[in-house]
Amino acid sequence: MMHKFIKAIALTLALVGLAGCSDNSEQAIIHQAVAIESGDECHLCGMLIKHFDGPKGEAFRKEQGSKVFKFCSTRDMFSYYLDPENKRNVSQLLVHDMSKMPWGNINDEHFIDGKTAWYVAGSSQTGAMGSTLASFSKEKDAKAFAEEFGGTVLSFKEITIETLL
């Protein structure tokens, strides 16, 4: 009986020790998209987000909890994200899935993970202040869009500051 008790204590201590080793700051917190309201301003440029067609973006920072940073275009979102100071602190990016809605009628029910999305750069479709990146959940949808409107299909990791210029 005493042997089982000692084993139980040893197991408990081992589990507590392992739990103490986890880095809570790195645990993934999945945020839900926040609807873009008529008075919301772009975190980067300050323009009213709803005044523009095309996909929008949202970012969550590790140290800011559930506070959302909203962007009038995927281009502005990437301009913010690709700044080295921001890049290491952004925990999650969300973008609209343009395969689910027309370019001029954005629906906030169709946000997707911006880091797994596919993008089309250089298309004829414009967003806030000119060209933007069309965002899609599936590569095949991005390719179909590029066939119709031009541009280059890119994964998240392929997007650089030069892509935005």
Image (spheres, rainbow, N blue to C red):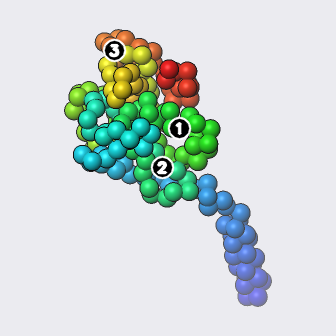
Identify the residue under disc 2: 60
Residue sitting at 67 percent across and 67 percent down?
19
Q: Is residue 10 above or below residue 146?
A: below
Residue at image position (26%, 35%) is 51
**Residues at badges 1 and 3 in contact (C-beta under 8 Å)?**
no
Helix, strand, or loop for circle 2? strand
From this viewpoint, is residue 144 visible? no
Residue at left offset 58%, top offset 47%: 89
**Marks 1 and 3, how far apart in space?**
24 Å
Q: Inspect the image, locate mark 1, and give the three-letter code of the amino acid beneath it.
A: Tyr
Answer whether labels 2 and 3 touch (C-beta < 8 Å). Answer: no
Sequence-earlier tag: 1 or 3: 1
- Residue type, numbered disc 2: Phe
The x and y percentages for residue 57 are 40, 39
Crowd tier of the residue under label 2, counting other residues whose Cα lies within 10 Å: few below 14, some 14–19, many 20 or above: many
Judged left or right of residue 116, residue 110 is: left
Please state which of residues 34 and 42 is positioned toward the viewer in this rendering: 42
The secondary element bearing badge 1 is classed as helix
Q: Earlier in the sequence, mark 1 or mark 2?
A: 2
**What kind of element bears circle 3?**
loop
- Residue under circle 3? 124
Give residue 110's position: percent from left, percent from top. 31, 40
Eyeballing the image, is 109 above or below 6?
Answer: above
Q: Of the residues under marks 2 and 3, which one precedes in the sequence? A: 2
Q: Nearer the viewer, residue 130 or 25?
A: 130
* Residue under pointer 1: 81
Q: Position of residue 112 (x, y in %)?
A: 39, 39
Q: Is residue 154 left or right of residue 111?
A: right
